[in-house]
Amino acid sequence: MALCPVPLNSRNFKAYYVAQTECDVLPANPVFTQIGTTGGSPQLTRDPLQSAVIDGSSEVTGVRLGSKVVNYEIAYELQYGVHDDLREFLFQSSWIAGNVLAGKTIVIDAISKTATIAGEDLTSDIAINDRIAMPSLTGGNKNPLLVTDISFSTDTVITFNSAKVANAQVGLVGLADETGTSDIRTSDKLYIGTERKLFAILVEYSDIDNANKYQLVMNCECTKSSDSPAVNAITTGTFTVVGKTLASAQPLPAGATLVPYDSYKSMTGIDGSITQEGERVMFSESMSFTLNRAGEPSYELGSDSMSFVDYGKTVNEVSITSKFVDFASALKFEQTEQSEVDYNFTAVYEGDCIGWTWPTAILTGVSPTVGEGTIPQELTLMPFKPQGALSSLVLHRVTNK
């Protein structure tokens, strides 16, 4: 006996992606990897084209549909390693592997927040704003750390100004005095590039009880991402995807394999920290940052689908909400000659680290709000890439595992 009909349920929705190497064509025997997502689905949009023919009445005499474009806002929670390929699609470049400096004798000084490697010059292997992990050390010393300075005279001295110092009395995990031997891993890096990357998205509605339960979106490009860490909250974000065609009620593509994503715990505001010029931003409460490739669909005569994605200038937008403690930011903003600063956001959980670096930015707004209680202050920033620089945004990943 058949069960009563019910609508489809979001819990049985899955989305997958696979890189395309050829326009309009899936790779042979495609391996689709699941996207870690909290919501959103591909949406086909077509503008209604209204006729203006006059027939003696007051009504529209005809309507046709315009060209197709597919939009998909992928909502997600920040998890280590889960969305690395999508970030490659957005950045239009590829991850560059970090260094592994094997078997170094390291002296951690918690008070000065330094790691010293005697008799070796590592300044060509480790850079300011790198995240490094020393996995064979103990406690908080083995967790990934943000490098705020590095120097060499007779020894290499690496400084971690924004790091916390361990305090057993309050259960705080952080730097502690230690001498030990460990590899030093530097973060993989992703820079903004110009290598356009196509991919296809396969959506599965498992509640549909037949083989034609998929939607296939072809020739997708990722044009924007936004992330929003905040106190007492899971860090969330979105990817904006534009696709050329959407086909519904499709079978699984020939030879296709569906691979679940690696499951990592979501990062929260507890795991994140913001630094300005290497110093932790005090009393920070939330942050939002957007990378916008300014990609818009373009069309041509004779086609009912988007022709290509037209890109403008890449823009970063960053805002930080913290507490008003002094006039330091206001004075930078008031200067006649703009003051350039670098900012970092770093999230570390269970030895896994994701980091954002904006090497050069200017303050575009400093806005304290006086009401009741402590005074919040919002900073708005515009990062940019000076001539000769590598990128206005650098993404980092490293693990101590």
Image (cartoon, grey):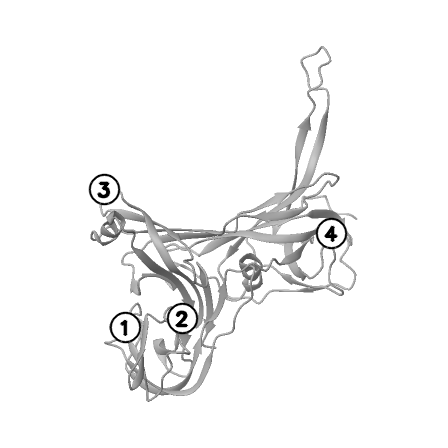
Which amino acid lies under the numbered mark 2 shown in the image of this protein? Asp
Q: Residues within 10 Å of mark 4 (few under 14, many from 20)?
A: some
Which amino acid lies under the numbered mark 3 shown in the image of this protein? Glu
| Secondary structure state at the residue bearing disc 4 | loop
Indicate the quadrant where residue 6 lies.
Answer: top right
Residue situated in front as seen by the camera: 31 or 69: 69
Name the front one of labels 4 and 1.
Answer: 1
Q: Residues within 10 Å of mark 3 (few under 14, many from 20)?
A: few
Label 2, on which residue?
Answer: 130
Q: Residues within 10 Å of mark 2 (few under 14, many from 20)?
A: many
Instruction: Tell whether label 2 touches label 4 (CB within 8 Å).
Output: no
The numbered mark, 4 or 2, whose residue comes first in the sequence reads 2
Label 3, on which residue?
Answer: 372
- Please state the horizontal and vertical placement of residue 272, each as a whole percent of the image: 38, 62
Name the front one of labels 2 and 1.
Answer: 2
Indicate the quadrant where residue 46 lies.
Answer: top right
Label 1, on which residue?
Answer: 165
The numbered mark, 4 or 1, whose residue comes first in the sequence reads 1
Q: Residue at x 71, y 33 (%)?
A: 65
- Please state the horizontal and vertical placement of residue 154, each as a whole percent of the image: 29, 86
**Label 2, label 3: how many angstroms apart (C-alpha)?**
40 Å
- Please state the horizontal and vertical placement of residue 68, each as a whole percent of the image: 68, 41
